[in-house]
Image (cartoon, rainbow, N blue to C red):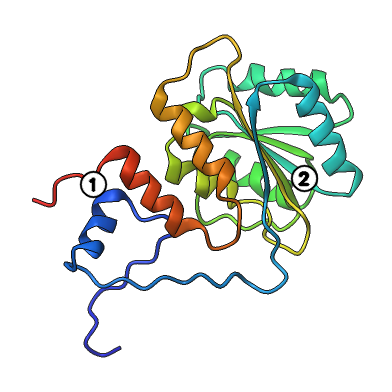
């Protein structure tokens, strides 16, 4: 509209921005209608399991699809990729992260889009702006260490076609999770229906607090 200077679009507004809308400082419009033929993502939260990684990857590959395996630490990401290769020997595995050279990263991503790889082991660089409809399984390692909005954005990288998509959020078996981490994972597991970003944002504000406006 002519009288609008700035429009902010977000899947999950950060608590401070959301609080500004709730208090009337900013206007708020909620879009809850999903794209046609889009299906909810089957989301499971569990302790890390090589068997689940194998089954989920093999199932996706058997229907001609591809997989994201998110490990948000550049240090050790190569050994994670080798581990995935050992678990699923028939998979073609590639690595992508933000510390790679621009050309190398672009090359890996283009080859993955061309389906020259089956599994992309990556950091959260895939979090926004990526649309590869053939990727319909995402495995997130150490999901307990990621924020709620971040988890929602990552999960949204799959299920971008009319195929059923699967999301597995892993936490370490041998560590005690904080209460906040448990709350975040419960919310992301519970709200799987399409258009649930606003509800997730409200829970995020509840868990983190609204922050200071000034």
Q: 22 or 7: which is nearer to us?
A: 22
Which structural element holds mark 2? strand
In this view of the protein, which residue sits in the foreground, 70 or 31?
31
Name of the residue lying farthest toward the top: 174
118 displayed left or right of 148? right
Question: Horizontal placement of 86 versus 71: left or right?
Answer: right
Describe residue 44's horizontal placement relative to residue 50 as left or right.
left
Of labels 1 and 2, earlier in sequence is 2
Front disc: 1 or 2: 1
Task: State whether residue 168 is above or below residue 129.
Answer: above
Q: Which residue is pictured at 16% across the width and 67% down the height? A: 25
What residue is shown at x 65% (from left), y 16% (from top)?
A: 79
Q: Residue at x 91, y 43 (%)?
A: 62
Residues at circles 1 and 2 in contact by the CB criterion of under 8 Å: no
Give the residue displayed 41% in from the left and 70% down from the top: 30
Residue 107's spot in the image, x, y percent?
65, 45
Residue 171 visible within the image: yes
Q: In this view of the protein, can residue 101 be seen by the observer?
A: no
Residue 35: x %, y % from top left = 63, 72
Tag 1 secondary structure: loop
Question: Badge 1: how crowded within 10 Å, few (<14), some, or many (20+)?
Answer: some
- The residue under label 2 is 66
Q: Which residue is mark 1?
A: 210
| Residue 97, quarter of picture | top right
Looking at this rendering, what residue extends furthest in the bottom direction? 2
Residue 45: image location, x then y, percent = 62, 32
Q: Quadrant of the N terminus?
A: bottom left
């Amino acid at each position: 509209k002519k009288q609008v200077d700035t429009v902010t679009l977000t899947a999950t507004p950060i608590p401070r921005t959301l609080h500004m809308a709730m208090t009337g400082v900013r206007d708020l419009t909620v879009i809850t209608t999903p794209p046609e033929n889009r299906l909810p993502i089957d989301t499971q939260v569990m302790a890390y399991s090589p068997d689940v990684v194998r089954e989920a990857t093999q199932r996706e590959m058997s229907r001609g699809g591809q997989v994201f395996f998110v490990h948000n630490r550049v240090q050790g990401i190569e050994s994670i990729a080798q581990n995935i290769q050992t678990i699923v020997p028939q998979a073609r595995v590639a690595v992508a992260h933000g510390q790679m050279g621009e050309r190398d990263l672009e090359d890996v991503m283009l080859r993955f889009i061309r389906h020259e790889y089956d599994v992309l082991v990556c950091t959260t660089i895939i979090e926004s702006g990526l649309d590869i409809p053939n990727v319909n399984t995402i495995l997130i390692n150490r999901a307990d260490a990621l924020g709620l909005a971040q988890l929602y954005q990552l999960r949204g990288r799959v299920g971008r076609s009319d195929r059923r998509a699967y999301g597995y959020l892993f936490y370490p078996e041998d560590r005690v999770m904080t209460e906040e981490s448990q709350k975040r994972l419960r919310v992301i597991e519970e709200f799987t229906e399409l258009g649930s970003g606003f509800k997730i944002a409200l829970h995020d504000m509840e868990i983190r607090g609204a922050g200071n406006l000034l």
